[in-house]
């Protein structure tokens, strides 16, 4: 058995802590916040997008980039920064946009999503946790024939990989989701993915943390901020907190989400992670709310019914790290959502206004690897738009990297090209 400190109790850290504890390790789960799931995982769009692992840097986005750069797309915002890391991130993002890179990144993400899906099935059977998980299916609503036709090649490619996706007319989409009759947005047709699911990521974090603390050798340290590490020679020795206290462990897993950059002085591997801010509004669910998850392709909005709540999430703002949220963006989100679902978003009571930062790499592929700069530290971050979808697969890869207790702490699996 090895003592492993997991830094960060979002979906990635909680999943990693659970699978490491289940593999027989003694785990300490640490977070600066007072409870699990308080960061980027708190109010996300709840989508378990097993078939939508599409990398953000793509030929389509590249074409649209001038409009975004000029501020003509309300869903995206770029704050230009004279920061070498920002410029490097931008150049690497552009280098990932050509078709071959986009498709290779997307396939790598889809593979990890598949691993997550099977880990989730095992977890649900083992734990019986209930976090409003549901095989809801997803409809991507396309506003016109051009947009629909542009979606078809990706559908065929995913069909060839074994994902079930179908092109539907508006009438066929309404048969699957009758609440679409209330939808005021343009719908020329839809892509339907029956196998995609949803679940409350924050509920998952809270429940799984409680479960593992009850059933495994897991200690919890909340309200504790990690400031760095101490080392012996070139190897990790202890986790150092901001009050200078230390925690001795055999290895550490860094799952600090968008704030991971604060540890970049010691872990240069995390430099490529930049925050991309998003927003969500959660309302009381009514009879007019669709049960199937919806994505409005034109407005880049995702809608989900999560238990008795209904959520819209969207916007992608590349801001200066630490810039905080912009209250005006909530109104932008609400107004876009009210344009298409007025019964739900015109005047309805907002139960939660939330903004969070997606930890985004230029390729959209997460960083899952041992640190070369500090042996004994393992990095699990950079999951961008899809951290909830990729969480359990990434945790499984962490267990493979760190090894079962008998082999710990040396890595048992070399990082792959897609890691
Ligand atoms: C608007 C929006 C919608 C989204 N929708 C979806 C979706 O539908 N499906 C999907 O798959 N993904 C979605 N995502 C992405 C997903 O939410 C993120 O990728 C995921 O939450 C990242 O998880 P994480 O555990 O890496 O980070 P976090 O959830 O942010 O967790 C990191 C934790 O580390 C802690 N921490 C950081 N630094 C320290 C430190 N120094 N010491 C101690 N603790 C520290 C933080 O307090 C935090 O709790 C969405 C994101 C946004 C913003």
Image (cartoon, helix red, strand yellow):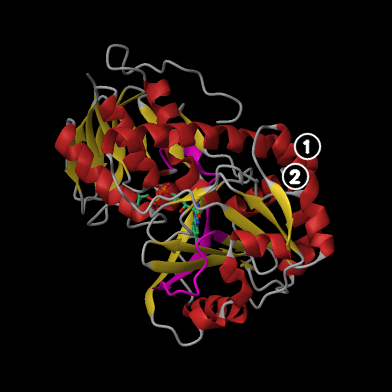
53 w.r.t. 339: above or below: above
**Circle 1 sits on which residue?**
100
Counting the numbered discs, the total is 2
Q: What residue is at 66 percent from the left and 39 percent from the top? A: 106
Estimate the spatial distance between the alpha carbons at disc 1 and disc 2, rounded to whole Å.
Answer: 13 Å
* Image position, residue 55 (x, y; %): 65, 46
The one of 386 and 101 positioned closer to us in this rendering: 386
Residue 85's tag is: none
Which of labels 1 and 2 is toward the front? 2
Q: What residue is at 36 percent from the left and 54 percent from the top? A: 132
* Image position, residue 390 (x, y; %): 49, 41
16 w.r.t. 292: above or below: above
Q: What residue is at 37 percent from the left and 30 percent from the top? A: 377
**Within 8 Å of ligand 1, the CB of disc 2?**
no
In this picture, residue 261 sits left or right of residue 419: left
* Image position, residue 18 (x, y; %): 29, 34
The one of 243 and 364 positioned closer to us in this rendering: 364
The answer to which quarter of the image holds residue 125 is top left
In this picture, residue 379 sits left or right of residue 2: right
**Circle 2 sits on which residue?**
154
Q: Which residues are magenta?
A: 265-293
């Amino acid at each position: 058995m090895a003592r492993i400190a997991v830094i960060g109790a979002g979906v990635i850290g909680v999943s990693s802590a659970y699978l490491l504890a289940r593999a027989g390790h003694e785990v300490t789960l640490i977070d600066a916040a007072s409870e699990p799931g308080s960061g980027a995982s708190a109010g996300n769009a709840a989508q378990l997008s097993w078939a939508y692992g599409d990398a953000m840097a793509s030929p389509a986005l590249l074409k649209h980039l001038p409009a975004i750069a000029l501020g003509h797309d309300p869903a995206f915002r770029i704050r230009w920064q004279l920061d070498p890391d920002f410029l490097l991130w931008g150049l690497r993002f552009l280098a990932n946009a050509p078709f071959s890179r986009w498709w290779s990144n997307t396939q790598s993400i889809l593979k990890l999503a598949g691993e997550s899906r099977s880990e989730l099935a095992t977890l649900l059977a083992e734990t019986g946790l209930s976090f409003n998980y549901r095989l809801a299916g997803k409809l991507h609503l396309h506003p016109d024939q051009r947009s629909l036709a542009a979606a078809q090649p990706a559908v065929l490619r995913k069909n060839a990989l074994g994902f079930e996706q179908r092109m539907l007319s508006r009438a066929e989409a309404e048969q699957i989701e009758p609440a679409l009759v209330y939808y005021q947005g343009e719908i020329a047709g839809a892509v339907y993915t029956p196998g995609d699911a949803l679940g409350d990521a924050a509920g998952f974090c809270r429940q799984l943390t409680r479960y593992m603390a009850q059933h495994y050798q897991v200690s919890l340290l909340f309200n504790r901020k990690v400031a760095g590490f101490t080392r012996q020679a070139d190897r990790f020795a202890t986790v150092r907190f901001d009050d200078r206290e230390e925690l001795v462990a055999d290895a550490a897993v860094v799952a600090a989400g968008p704030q991971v950059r604060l540890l970049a002085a010691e872990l240069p591997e995390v430099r490529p992670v930049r925050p991309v801010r998003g927003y969500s509004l959660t309302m009381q669910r009514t009879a007019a709310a669709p049960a199937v998850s919806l994505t409005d392709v034109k407005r880049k909005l995702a809608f989900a019914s999560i238990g008795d709540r209904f959520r819209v999430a969207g916007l992608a703002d590349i801001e200066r790290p630490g810039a905080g949220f912009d209250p005006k963006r909530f109104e932008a989100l609400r107004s876009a959502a009210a344009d298409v679902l007025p019964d739900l978003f015109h005047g309805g009571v907002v139960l939660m206004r939330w903004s969070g930062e997606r930890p985004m790499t230029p390729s959209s592929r997460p960083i899952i690897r041992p640190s070369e700069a500090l042996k004994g530290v393992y990095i699990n971050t950079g999951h961008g738009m899809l951290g909830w979808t990729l969480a359990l697969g990434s945790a499984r890869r962490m267990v493979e990297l760190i090894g079962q207790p008998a082999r710990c702490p040396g890595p048992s699996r070399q990082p792959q090209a897609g890691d």
